[in-house]
Image (cartoon, helix red, strand yellow):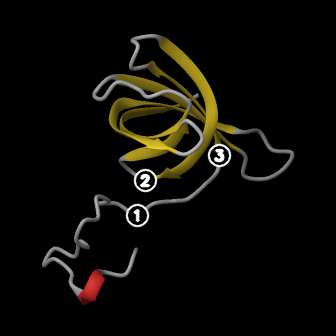
Amino acid sequence: MATPPFGHVHPDGRIPDERRRQPRLYLSLPITVLAATADRDLVACGTRLDNLSAGGIYVRLPWPLVLGSPFIARLSAVARPGRRALRVALGGDVLRVEPRRNHRYGTALVITWQHAV
């Protein structure tokens, strides 16, 4: 958690201007996202996970997605070399899209369901 400016913390423990309500895991795992772009094209994009929480994920994509539109993603993780990868299907809605450097878009996705595949 970041240090609050001037030592100020809300009574509920949140840091001012902090959108995060849940702790984050910063993991660079392969993920494939299927969603609608701002041009209403349905696209699938392989990328890397920036971070993950109990309620959502944050990824960088080459196209802006439509706010509020549904998405489906497949996340793969390997605990140890030589072991079978754990694959999880995730679904939910696009919460936030932020322009980033190199023509990428930071995209916050709210998870509403998940299923091990």
Residue identified by numbered label 1: 23
Residue at the farthest left position: 11
In the shown orientation, is residue 115 left or right of residue 11?
right
Furthest residue toward bottom: 7
State which quarter of the image contains the N terminus: bottom left
Q: Amino acid at mark 1?
A: Pro
Q: Position of residue 50 (x, y in %)?
A: 55, 50
Rounded to the nearest angstrom, the CA distance separating label 1 from label 2 is 6 Å
Residue at 79% x, 53% y is 80
Identified at 52% across, 59% down, the residue is 25
Image quadrant in which you'd find residue 93: top left
Question: Is 8 placed left or right of 27 in the picture?
Answer: left
N-terminal of the pair, mark 2 or mark 3, is 3
Amino acid type, label 2: Ser
Specify the label residue 29 is tagged with. 3
**Disc 2 marks which residue?**
53
The kind of residue on which mark 3 rests is Leu
The crowding category of the residue bearing disc 2, from other C-alpha atoms within 10 Å (few below 14, some 14 to 19, many at least 20), is some
Residue 41 position in % (x across, y down): 46, 10
Q: Position of residue 18 (x, y in %)?
A: 29, 64
Q: Relative to 61, does residue 40 appear above or below in the rendering?
A: above
* Cβ–Cβ under 8 Å for marks 2 and 3: no
Q: Residues within 10 Å of mark 1 (few under 14, many from 20)?
A: few
